Every structure is written in structure tokens, then in C-alpha cells.
Amino acid sequence: MAFRKVVFLDRDGVINYDSPDYIKSWAEFVFLPNTLSALSILHQNKFQVIITTNQSAIGRKLIAKNTLNEIHHRLIQIVSAHGGKIHDIFFCPHHPDDVCSCRKPRIGLLEQAVHKYNIDLADTTMMGDSATDMECAQNAGCGRSVLVLTGKGTLACKQLDQLKLSPDYIARDLFAAVQWIVDQPLTAGSLGT
């Protein structure tokens, strides 16, 4: 059975506060305001939430893969306890200098999700706080892209102007993005360029 109404979410700067020193432990993971409510609304409206996140702290030897898995396990549990659901998490562990296919804006993480869940990318929405998230959405052929202004969102607006790339919507945070998504019909191929 194919997943429908898929939302690909970036993690740091979208779900939780980002850090220039990276999130290396659960103690450093702090939810952004209204995030848990936003994820609950997505679940209530039958969206499938899949996190796709670059986690170069592993490649930089700042965090072990099992520690990252523990952080994600707790994240999934807390979201579930608040009425939401994260269906899966795909992450790129590589250093930015590594040649890999999974580090956004490359589309390897989304391809993994497509293969596992039989997803039609034209029916998906990518949400993130960076230009690389919006580039990934375009490169993969996601139906919609939403930039949130938390995290690196303000810097991303300038970078996207230089790239001549426009997200379908710019939201102040994840909660506002979710409100927009729930109210919009998905039209395949609507990613603005």
C-alpha cells in the first residue's frame, strides 16, 4: 500500500531549536514552541510525517549513531504522547565534504523513503528551514515546498533569492506551515521555480 499525503520534515530548526554546536544529546534537544501541536494536527488530518535530516555531527565524530538513534526514539515517543505520529526518520550521517547521495539538497533520503513506502513524490510536501531543503524539494519533484522562518529560515530567503527558487509558502513556524498545508489541496508539480 502506498503512502499518501506525505510531509517530509527537516528536524533541526523546524521541530527543535538548532545549534551551531550541533545537537549531540537528548539534553540539547529542545522542541520549538507549538511543534507538538503542529505534529498532532498533521496526524489528525491523516498526513504521513517522515523526517529527513542531515546529521553531519556523526561524520564529524561529535555524536555516535546509537546516540542519534536514542534521540530519535525519544522524539517519536514524545510526539506520540502528544497525539502526533512520526512514521519514519531518514538521516544523512556524512560530513559535508564526503561524496554521498543522501545529503540534502541531494535526494537520496527521499529516494529511500519512496522505496520503502511506495511514495509518489508529486503528492508530497517538503518542509524545512534552509535553502538546501527547498532545493531538495525541487530536485526530487516534491509537489509542494514550505519554508519555515525558524532556524535558518531568514538566511534561506536570501539564498533562495540568489538561486531564483521560490517555495510554495513561507511560514513563521511549523504550526503556521501545518495550518496552511491542511487548508490547501495538493496539486502535483506545484513547486515554484
Image (cartoon, helix red, strand yellow):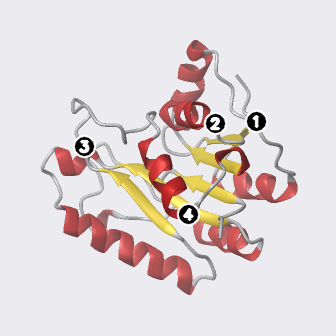
Residue bearing mark 4: 117
Compared across the picture, whether 144 is left or right of 72 comes to right
Q: How far apart are marks 2 and 4 (CA)?
A: 16 Å
Q: Which of marks 3 and 4 is in front?
A: 4
Compared across the picture, whether 88 is left or right of 170 comes to left
Image position, residue 181 (x, y; %): 77, 54
Amino acid under disc 4: Tyr
Residue bearing mark 3: 94
Q: Which one is earlier in the sequence, the residue at label 3 or at label 1?
A: 3
Q: How far apart are marks 3 and 4 (CA)?
A: 24 Å
Image position, residue 16 (x, y; %): 46, 59
Quick one: SS at disc 2? loop
Please give the name of the residue rendered at 70% of the width and 67% of the height, measured from the top-left corner.
42
Residue bearing mark 2: 141
Image position, residue 176 (x, y; %): 73, 54
Q: Which one is earlier in the sequence, the residue at label 2 or at label 3?
A: 3
Please give the name of the residue rendered at 66% of the width and 58% of the height, measured from the top-left corner.
6
Q: Neighbour class for label 3 at 10 Å: few (<14), some, many (≥20)?
A: some
Q: Is 152 above or below relative to 112?
A: above
Q: How far apart are marks 3 and 1 (CA)?
A: 30 Å
Quick one: SS at disc 3? loop
Are discs 2 and 4 less than 8 Å apart at CB? no
Image position, residue 140 (x, y; %): 57, 37
Q: How far apart are marks 2 and 3 (CA)?
A: 23 Å
Q: Distance between the residues labelled 2 and 1?
A: 7 Å
Quick one: SS at disc 1? loop
Amino acid under disc 3: His
Q: Neighbour class for label 4 at 10 Å: few (<14), some, many (≥20)?
A: some
Tag shown at residue 189: 1
Q: Nearer the viewer, mark 2 or mark 4?
A: 4
Please give the name of the residue rendered at 41% of the width and 57% of the height, measured from the top-left corner.
90
